[in-house]
Image (cartoon, rainbow, N blue to C red):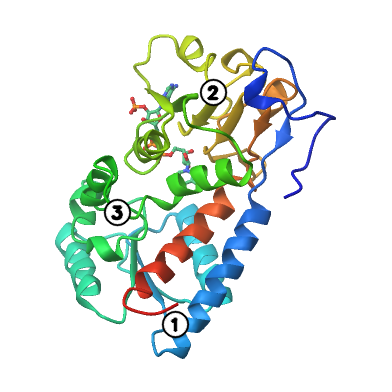
């Protein structure tokens, strides 16, 4: 592990919270590469035993950024030896049509992972439909049953993005047990499962959302701050304790066609102890973990 550093630091991070430090870039590309290598090995072993791991991605939108994401999943799957079937039902698809397809894929023994892509057509409720995904194939933790099992401490696939947050923190050796962590955002796909995963690791967890009265007052004591609000620049230096580790899950399109996170990266530079970049932080790890979940699902009953 050789984290890029933006300035010289002995990486005191959580141990000296009041000291201003250089900010370590907690990139995700190296971790993603490592995960994909392991997935490739496991997929090859499974295929040699007659089970080619297969991921189905159900799409019911013409949204361009969604199409880009699905293409990137399909490319990554192909590179790791996982078959990726994109089931495009069109933006006019009704709830029953989507539900029926999810149920059919759940019953298909050749399919090991199922993902329901967002956005969905207006009036279609994501969680209602995702409940049609068999929990053992729910590789992106979309079925409410998966979130419930996660909350109960039972085995379940966490949403890949939430799992990626924890994987990045672990990869960069960020201690969690007994530390104060704050999650900004409470969606079922990111904020809530991240909070559950942090609780499982014995962190003290505070969850903030749009009705939180004084966001900075709550985020400032955090040793670890995870931001998943979808609001560009929401988190400034004023929200961050010196030395804190900040995970920026947000992906917001910029005017020049790029991507920016929820954290004002330039503003927190030199104040945060660690910061995940956007792009190149949580995103690549998310895709790699989606593939890992698919291989794990395919590996049930196999000796790999
Ligand atoms: P979401 O469903 O829109 O949820 C956003 C959450 O942030 C909500 O809980 C909302 O509060 C809260 N929030 C919004 N504005 C806030 C503010 N000003 N102060 C405090 N809380 C605020 O979004 P999501 O699906 O969780 O995604 C969040 C971000 O992560 C988006 O930018 C998305 O693109 C990105 N994302 C990235 C990846 C990846 O792989 N890198 C994957 C998934 C999502 P309320 O509940 O009160 O409305």
For residue 200, side relative to residue 254 (left or right): left
- Percent from the top left, x then y, of residue 178? 47, 25
Q: Which quarter of the image is occupied by the C terminus?
A: bottom left
Viewer-proximal residue, 31 or 84? 31
**Quadrant of the picture in which ligand 1 is shown:** top left
Q: Residue furthest left?
A: 96
Determine if the C-beta at disc 2 is less than 8 A from ligand 1: yes
Q: Position of residue 236 (x, y in %)?
A: 61, 19
Tell me where residue 27 sits by quadrant: top right
Q: Nearer the viewer, residue 136 or 111?
A: 136
| Residue to which mark 3 is pinned | 155
- Which circle's residue, 3 or 1, is located before the other in the chain? 1
Query: Which quadrant holds residue 303?
Result: bottom left
Q: Do the residues bearing badges 1 and 2 touch, measured as CB atoms within 8 Å?
A: no
Is residue 59 depicted above or below 241 in this figure?
below
Q: Is mark 1 within 8 Å of ligand 1?
A: no
Q: Secondary structure at mark 1?
A: helix
Q: Earlier in the sequence, mark 1 or mark 2?
A: 1
Residue placed most toward the observer, 287 or 47 = 47
Q: Which residue is mark 1?
A: 46
Residue situated furthest right in the rendering = 8
Which residue is disc 2 drawn over? 234
Q: Can you see residue 125?
A: no
Q: In terms of secondary structure, where does tag 2 sit?
A: loop
The x, y position of residue 151, in whole percent, is 27, 40
Residue drawn at 49 percent across, 78 percent down: 43
Disc number lying in front (3 or 2): 3
State the CA–CA distance, disc 3 to disc 1: 22 Å
């Amino acid at each position: 592990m050789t984290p890029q550093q933006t300035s010289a630091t002995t990486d005191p991070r959580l141990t000296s919270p009041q000291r201003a430090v250089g900010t370590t870039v907690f990139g995700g590309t190296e971790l993603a590469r490592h995960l994909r290598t392991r997935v490739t090995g496991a997929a090859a072993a499974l295929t040699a035993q007659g089970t080619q791991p297969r991921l189905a991605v159900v799409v019911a939108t013409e949204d361009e950024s969604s199409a880009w994401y699905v293409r990137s999943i399909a490319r990554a799957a192909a590179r790791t030896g996982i078959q990726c079937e994109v089931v495009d039902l069109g933006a006019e698809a009704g709830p029953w049509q989507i539900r029926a397809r999810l149920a059919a894929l759940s019953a298909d023994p050749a399919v090991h992972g199922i993902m329901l892509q967002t956005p969905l057509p207006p009036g279609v409720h994501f969680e209602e439909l995702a409940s049609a995904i068999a929990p053992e194939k729910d590789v992106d933790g979309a079925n409410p049953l998966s979130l419930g099992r996660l909350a109960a401490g039972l085995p379940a696939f966490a949403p890949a993005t939430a799992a990626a947050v924890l994987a990045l923190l672990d990869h960069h050796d960020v201690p969690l047990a007994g530390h104060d962590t704050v999650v900004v955002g409470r969606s079922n796909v990111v904020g809530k499962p991240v909070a559950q995963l942090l609780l499982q690791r014995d962190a003290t967890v505070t969850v903030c959302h749009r009705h939180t009265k004084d966001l900075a007052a709550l985020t400032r004591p955090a040793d670890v701050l995870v931001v998943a609000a979808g609001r560009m620049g929401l988190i400034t230096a004023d929200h961050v304790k010196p030395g804190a580790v900040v995970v920026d899950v947000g992906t917001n399109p910029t005017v020049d066609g790029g991507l920016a996170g929820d954290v004002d990266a330039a503003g927190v530079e030199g104040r945060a102890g660690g910061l995940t970049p956007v792009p190149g932080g949580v995103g690549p790890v998310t895709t790699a973990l989606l593939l890992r979940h698919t291989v794990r699902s395919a590996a049930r009953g196999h000796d790999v």
